[in-house]
Amino acid sequence: MAAAPTSYTAEMAYDSDRRKVRTSIQFSLLNLFPNSHLFHNGLGWLSIPTGAGIASLMFSGYLCLFPSIIFSKYIMDWPSIFNRKLAIVHPPFDSAEERNAAATAAGSATAIKTLSARSQMNIQKSGGPDSIAPRLMRQISLFGPGIPGSYWLSRIYLLMSRWNFYLTGRIFIDQLTERYMGHWIRFGESALLQVRTCWLDDVVEAFGKKHCGGPFNVVILGAGYDTRCYRLDILRNENARLYEIDAVGTQTIKKNALKKANVDSGNVHFVSCDFERENWMGALESRSNFDKSLPTVFIWEGVSYYLDRDVVKATISEVSKCGNGSCIGFDYAHIACFNPTVLKSTKSVGEPWKFGMDPGNVDDFVKGCDESSSGFKLQVLDHLRYEELKDRYLAKYVGGGHIGYLNDFGGFLLLGIGSETPSSV
């Protein structure tokens, strides 16, 4: 499938060497008979008992963990996903209940799940490009801090999920989501994280390739456990100035994990900020040496969902005030994904979904961002939907299906200013 030549990331995405790594399954029983429909279907049936085994073990593990949760919350009063104590934030707030979970001392549970998915896709050699994620994930429990015993339960679950993939070629969590929750959830976390990681890697590398002749900025907004500043070759260029902005709770946990994993973060400026209560550009300029006159790429991965629409528009409009060639890459949820089950689920973990849009209304949304800006007009450089993303970044089974589960979840948008080549929407 040929990509549109005007796509900002097409050259990177369709490079033959990169594409081969990203869309191949390097270690699985599927590779014994890769062109056999019968063998493929047989392993699909095998995934039913193996998946049931994983689910049963995790249910038992949760029951065993219950006393630890009680001990942590009610006896020791440790911060955790079950006891959201405030971290030190700018400015202070009255209670943990009014804060997004990322600002609490326990950090963001969603950010940990994101890291875990990237780690699994890399370790099980199913196309995942994030080689740093496994090193960080070894330092962190899926439950976050403050729950004794949860680290080892996490290790067991992740190991069993990988072996399930080695044996059956199926990703347990995506298969579970598609089979039992597909009528209200349009993506599995592994498939979504694979395509999102690859696309934003392409955004950064395409931008760096265009601007590496002089100084340029890379800003990771709502960084979570993003690792691009530590693993992308283009960012080892002495002209690259690297910044990560996030809520203080998650950022503190990440910095500790980087140190334990012996990942050098000396070239990265860490800036703490709350997106809903502060002007992030003001925080970036006042708490670092950021120079917005330089061309800047902003990576805003998995954040827009949790912010009010006006905050999203205001964030994007800041890009138009930066140097020529600046751009922002982000993902958004389809408004149809905002059903009662999803809204209740995201609220229950302290990270409620707030923003989404109809992919057909992207032009109107961009115009609204322009109206909020006093700078240059924004152009759509990339707007990718699930079909092209699967073709670019997911390995295929015999018969044409892709690993993981990805439906019409929304889209990925790259908006920029200056002389960059726009993409057709």
Image (cartoon, grey):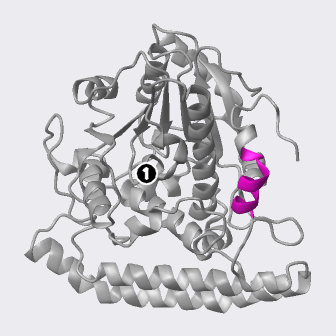
**Left or right side of 388 for 71:** left
Q: Is residue 267 visible?
A: yes
In the rendered view, tell whether residue 403 sits above or below residue 199: below
Camera-side residue: 237 or 15? Answer: 237
Camera-side residue: 260 or 348? Answer: 260
State the predominant SS element of the stretch in magenta.
Answer: helix
Position in image of residue 277 (x %, y %): 27, 31
Q: Which residues are magenta?
A: 13-23
| Residue 18 included in the magenta stretch of the image | yes
Say which quadrant the C terminus sits in: top right
**Left or right side of 93 for 30:** right
Q: Is residue 185 visible?
A: no
In the rendered view, tell whether residue 160 sits above or below residue 274: below
Quarter of image, res 164:
bottom right
Position in image of residue 199 (x %, y %): 63, 45
Camera-side residue: 281 or 420? Answer: 420
Residue reaching furthest top? 374
**Residue at point 65% right, 73% down?**
175
Position in image of residue 229 (x %, y %): 43, 46
Camera-side residue: 316 or 206? Answer: 206
**Residue at point 21% right, 71% down?**
146
How many numbered tags mark residues here? 1
Quarter of image, res 7:
top right
Question: Type of residue at label 1?
Answer: Tyr
For disc 1, the marked residue is: 230
| Residue 69 included in the magenta stretch of the image | no
**Left or right side of 18 for 109:** left
Say few, some or many: other residues with alpha carbon within 10 Å of mark 1 (under 14 / 14 to 19 / 20 or more). Answer: some
Secondary structure beneath label 1: helix
Position in image of residue 278 (x %, y %): 27, 29
**Residue at point 51% right, 63% down?**
131
